Amino acid sequence: MTLYQTSSLNILKTWLLMSLFLVLIIAFGFVMSAYYGNINIIYGAIIFSLALNFFSYFFSDKIALSINGANEIKSRSVHTELWNVVENLSITAGLPMPRLYIIDDPIPNAFATGRNENNSAVAVTNGLLLILNKSELEGVIAHELSHIKNKDILIQTIVVVLVGAIAMISELFLRFNIFNNDGQKKNPILFIFVLVAMILVPIAASIIRLAISRKREFLADSSGALLTRYPEGLANALQKISQYNQPLKHAHAATAHMYIVNPLGLSGDKNDKDEKVSWFSKLFMTHPSVSERVRALLGETMSEKK
């Protein structure tokens, strides 16, 4: 399968995953409706899920940028080299130039957000601009533009709101049932089932969010290398960024999957020296390990040279 075919399949998977989130919310509403004997709960879940998707589609990027303390760069003169790199690579990729944002943080990192090519943004930290040379910066920007080109940013941004909403609703119901044991007395078996659902639904939503990020990072790495024709630039940048292994000031678990490297200070490399990471551990990783990504990039380079 070619890179472009994979990108097209990626778009289909995005909408399938969106539908899965809708099903999770509605299924949760169905369980609560059965538990409380109130059909209005399931209707409310359907209306809420549709409204949440509408809100997420139009406003999730603003929420993500605000959570991460990003400030818009409105003039080329403020960060000339960054502006020029983004502008040139956007032209090469056939994309409208995204809005640029800077995050005041010495730890190097970056992410892309938005809902489509015409409504997108790229945010980088001050630290990223300080430690990377031009070819490495181009590698990072090409990676983020690839997320935009591959239609990753919509799902990566929307799940910030969706997962957060599911977790919040589940916690509210959980707290209410812990302090209200009427349902436990009436039907203890159903009560246990409801408690299990309240715990497992947000966990399932989080695993979906993490899986979305891991799969798309490899594709964005490959697409970014194809865009710059210099995979070593991105590989070197990833290695430099991962060396810091410290959390950003505004690091948040809800948006960790959006960054090029985990902003919580967990690169995953400590598990990737001489031993394989178990499939269970990978379920809870926001990103593939940096060393694994670097090997994939340099492996592709070696194959091309042969």
Image (cartoon, rainbow, N blue to C red):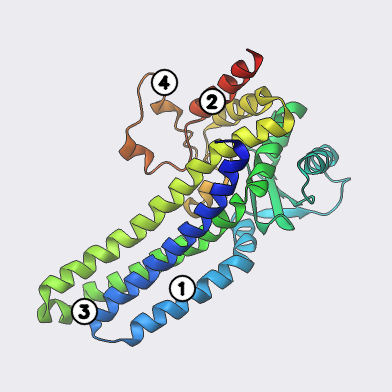
Marking on residue 180: 3
Distance Cα–Cα, label 4 vs label 3:
49 Å
The residue lying at 50 percent from left, 52 percent from top is 13
Say whether residue 263 is visible: no
Distance Cα–Cα, label 2 vs label 4:
15 Å
Say whether residue 205 is visible: yes
Check contact, mark 1 vs mark 4: CB within 8 A.
no
Q: Earlier in the sequence, mark 1 or mark 3?
A: 1
The residue at which mark 2 appears reads as 296
Q: Nearer the viewer, mark 4 or mark 3?
A: 4
Q: Residue furthest top?
A: 306
Amino acid tagged 2: Ala
Q: Decide if residue 14 is on the left or right side of residue 113.
A: left
The vertical placement of 273 against 10, above or below, is above
Distance Cα–Cα, label 2 vs label 1:
38 Å
Kind of element beneath mark 4: loop
Check contact, mark 2 vs mark 4: CB within 8 A.
no
- Spot occupied by residue 137 in the image (x, y as percentages of width and height): 72, 33
Label 4: how many Cα within 10 Å (few below 14, some 14–19, many 20+)? few
Marking on residue 49: 1
The vertical placement of 63 against 232, above or below, is below
Distance Cα–Cα, label 1 vs label 4:
43 Å
The residue lying at 51 percent from left, 63 percent from top is 161
Q: Nearer the viewer, mark 1 or mark 4?
A: 1
